[in-house]
Amino acid sequence: MVERWRPETHMFHLPVGEYTITLEDVYYILGLNVSGFPVSGSNFVHVKEVCQDYLRVIPSERATKDNSIKLKWLKDMFHDVGEDASVLEKQVSCRAYILRMIRGLLMYDKSNDRVHLKYLSLLGDLNKASQYSCGSML
């Protein structure tokens, strides 16, 4: 399938014609909401404050750059949450995991190993996070 993708037209060229992936396809394939509250916000965040509020830890200077945080740091800090962890610890780990998925799946870029922290504030209430439109991120 990769051989048939044409980046200049953003379409797959198949023997039966040209096709592109739509937001409806994203909904059916990945199960992501494509309608709802738009994902928006300021590109400027106070790194220490947002990390303390939503991750309960302030990352080192090496883990952050501008308004982003290293994916490896998120993985190393939050990958091993045991069954006996508190609800708060599980929520924090879940936020870190979702941030990694946002960067790794929805906005993949081989040359970058960071995710912007503007998405972290949208994950404050994990029950509400499913109401955001992932279509507006793509």
Image (cartoon, rainbow, N blue to C red):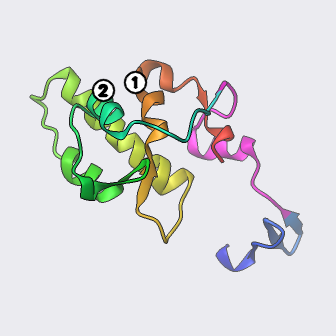
* 48 and 106: which is toward the camera: 48
Measured as percent of width and height from the top left, residue 9 is found at 84, 69
- Total number of numbered discs in the rendering: 2
Instruction: Identify the element where label 2 is drawn.
Output: helix
Could you give the CA–CA distance between mark 1 and mark 2, rounded to whole angstroms?
8 Å
Residue found 80% across the figure and 66% down from its top: 11
Residue ID at (71%, 46%)? 25
The image's mark for residue 124 is 1
Residues at discs 1 and 2 in contact (Cβ within 8 Å):
yes
Q: Amino acid at mark 2?
A: Asp
Mark 2: few, some, or many residues within 10 Å (few <14, many ≥20)? some
Identify the amino acid type marked 1. Answer: Gly
Q: Which mark is residue 103?
A: none
- Decide: few, some or many residues near mark 1? Use Cα within 10 Å; few <14, some 14-19, many ≥20: some
Q: Which residue is mark 2?
A: 53
Residue 130 position within the rendered picture, expressed as x and y whole percent measured from the top left: 52, 26
Which residue is located at x 23 percent, y 30 percent? 90
The residue nearer to you, when weighing 20 against 109, is 109
Q: What is the span of residues highlighted in magenta in the rendered image?
A: 19-37
Residue 54: % across, % down? 32, 29
- Using the image, determine if residue 30 lies above or below residue 39: below
Whether 23 is among the magenta residues is yes
Look at the picture and state if 100 lies above or below 113: above
Residue situated in front as seen by the camera: 32 or 36: 36
The correct choice, above or below, for 117 with respect to 14 in the image is above
Judged from this view, the residue extending furthest toward the bottom is 3
